[in-house]
Image (cartoon, helix red, strand yellow):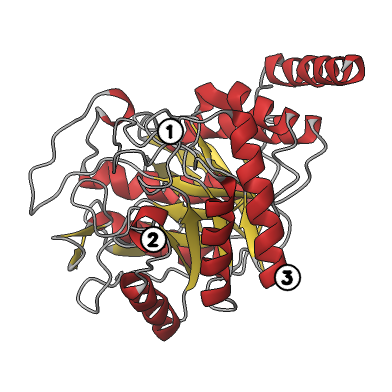
């Protein structure tokens, strides 16, 4: 016990030291990028009403099954031993038809299995509580893993367990559930990817740290986290990602980091969108949403996140699609453009100058490219001759792609929508 206490104290002191260090100013504030070219799998999305009519009009290689009808434990096993796989079977078949990988989030206890069947329902009564009998959880995980062996390649253990409306158990109980699932899934399919429970909010890095203290990072191939920055701009997520990575390093966890859910409330042309309390109290305009999704994908990758599942495609309040996914918002054009710019490129680094101008340096086939923007204001910036670039690509607020030669005076008008200079 004494050794554990000393080890926990050392970890706590190391994390505190890392997190209390001030972020240095440019140019040393450059973000350390992920290594290697950006793969298609970096681009994920949430889809709730899958059909040919609502299928995303943007290319997404990965689909996270959360807030999707018929995919939680209480949907799949409404009564002990009575299984209902109809909707999940359809989702899996549709993903295969479109060549899309799946991440299935496990959890949300059926009322019959719940330790507290009358817990206030976030979705269903009893859902947030852990199962009363751990054997019920093991049977559920094994049944799903066997049925979809080789078809669902990634499994996430519970959604946002640091929030009481999602999980009302203890961290110790969550670690036990994660350990069970990790062992069972790898017994069934050694090639499957197991993602840790996805904590949300920069305010709860201490919760995440305590989860790792208990060994929660050991029963996972990937660490999942929700780097929501709403209502603030995407640049605010950079420090939270740094904190999470520092926490992982302090615990000796050197595994991929996925942002399994992130998004904003966005205006809709088909439905009334009202602000909510908390982080969703701000509704982005179409222009803001277009700019934010581009900057989020740039900065997450540059900060060390190797997959980002945008929330969502077909939701009226947060969708890149509109009219329940049957059409596109301008933000969808931002998603498609930043995917084109990043896919296959190596990000050499990103950073902000004292003037507020951001730059991400890319390399594609040995040639340099640069993405520039200013999140706070419109600002002219001089493009250095050493960049050896001649073309500028950007988007209008409506999502139209605009190509133009670099002005002869090399002065570029920069604003909140990123511009690719190549």
- Please state which of the two labelled residues, at mark 2 or mark 1, is closer to the viewer: 2
What residue appears at the point 26 percent right and 40 percent down from the top-left corner?
265
Q: CA distance from mark 3 to mark 1?
A: 35 Å
Q: Name the residue carrying label 3.
A: 190
> Does dot 1 land on a helix, a strand or a loop?
loop
Q: Where 12 falls versus 59 (above or below)?
A: above
Give the quadrant of the C terminus: bottom right
Where residue 273 sits, quadrant-wise, is top left
- Please state which of the two labelled residues, at mark 3 or mark 2, is closer to the viewer: 2
Evaluate whether residue 366 shows in this view.
no
Pointer 3 or 1: first along the chain: 3
Answer with left or right where residue 409 lies relative to residue 58.
right
> Does dot 2 land on a helix, a strand or a loop?
loop
Answer with left or right where residue 179 lies relative to residue 268.
right
Mark number displayed over residue 77:
2
Where in the figure is residue 163, as x and y percent of width and height?
44, 29
> Does dot 3 land on a helix, a strand or a loop?
loop
Where in the figure is residue 129, as x and y percent of width and height?
44, 36
Pointer 2 or 1: first along the chain: 2
Q: Name the residue carrying label 1.
A: 229
Q: Where 244 falls versus 178 (above or below)?
A: above
Where in the figure is residue 117, as x and y percent of width and height?
35, 37
């Amino acid at each position: 016990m004494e050794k554990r206490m000393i080890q926990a104290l050392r970890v706590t002191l190391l994390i505190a030291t890392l997190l209390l260090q001030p972020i240095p100013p440019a140019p040393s504030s450059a973000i350390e990028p992920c290594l290697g070219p950006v793969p298609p799998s970096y681009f994920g999305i949430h889809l709730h009403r899958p059909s040919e009519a609502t299928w995303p009009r943007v290319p997404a290689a990965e689909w996270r099954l959360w807030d999707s009808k018929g995919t939680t434990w209480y949907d799949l096993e409404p009564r002990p031993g009575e299984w209902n796989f109809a909707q999940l079977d359809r989702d899996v078949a549709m993903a295969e038809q479109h060549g899309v990988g799946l991440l299935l989030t496990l959890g949300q206890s059926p009322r019959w299995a719940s330790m507290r069947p009358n817990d206030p329902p976030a979705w269903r009564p009893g859902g947030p509580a852990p199962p009363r009998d751990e054997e019920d959880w093991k049977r559920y995980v094994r049944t799903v893993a066997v049925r979809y062996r080789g078809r669902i390649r990634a499994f996430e253990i519970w959604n946002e367990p640091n929030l009481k409306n999602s999980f009302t158990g203890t961290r110790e109980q969550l670690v036990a559930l994660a350990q069970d699932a990790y062992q069972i899934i790898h017994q069934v399919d050694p090639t499957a990817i197991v993602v840790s429970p996805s904590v949300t909010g920069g305010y709860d890095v201490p919760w995440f740290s305590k989860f790792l203290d208990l060994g929660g990072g050991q029963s996972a191939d990937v660490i999942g986290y929700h780097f929501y920055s709403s209502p603030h701009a995407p640049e605010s997520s950079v420090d939270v990602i740094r904190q999470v990575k520092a926490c992982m390093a302090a615990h000796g966890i050197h595994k991929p980091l996925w942002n399994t859910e992130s998004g904003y409330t966005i205006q809709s042309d088909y439905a009334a969108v009202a602000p909510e309390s908390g982080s969703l109290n701000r509704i982005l305009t179409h222009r803001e949403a277009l700019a934010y999704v581009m900057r989020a994908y740039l900065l997450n990758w540059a900060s060390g996140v190797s997959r980002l599942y945008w929330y969502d495609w077909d939701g009226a309040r947060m969708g890149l699609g509109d009219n329940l996914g049957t059409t596109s918002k301008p933000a969808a054009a931002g998603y498609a453009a930043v995917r084109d710019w990043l896919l296959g490129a190596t990000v050499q680094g990103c950073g902000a100058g004292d003037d507020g101008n951001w730059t991400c340096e890319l390399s594609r086939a040995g040639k340099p490219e640069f993405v520039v923007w200013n999140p706070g204001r419109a600002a002219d910036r001089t493009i250095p001759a050493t960049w050896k670039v001649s073309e500028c690509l950007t988007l209008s607020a409506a999502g139209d792609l605009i190509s133009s030669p670099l002005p002869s005076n090399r002065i570029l008008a920069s604003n909140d929508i990123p511009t690719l200079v190549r």
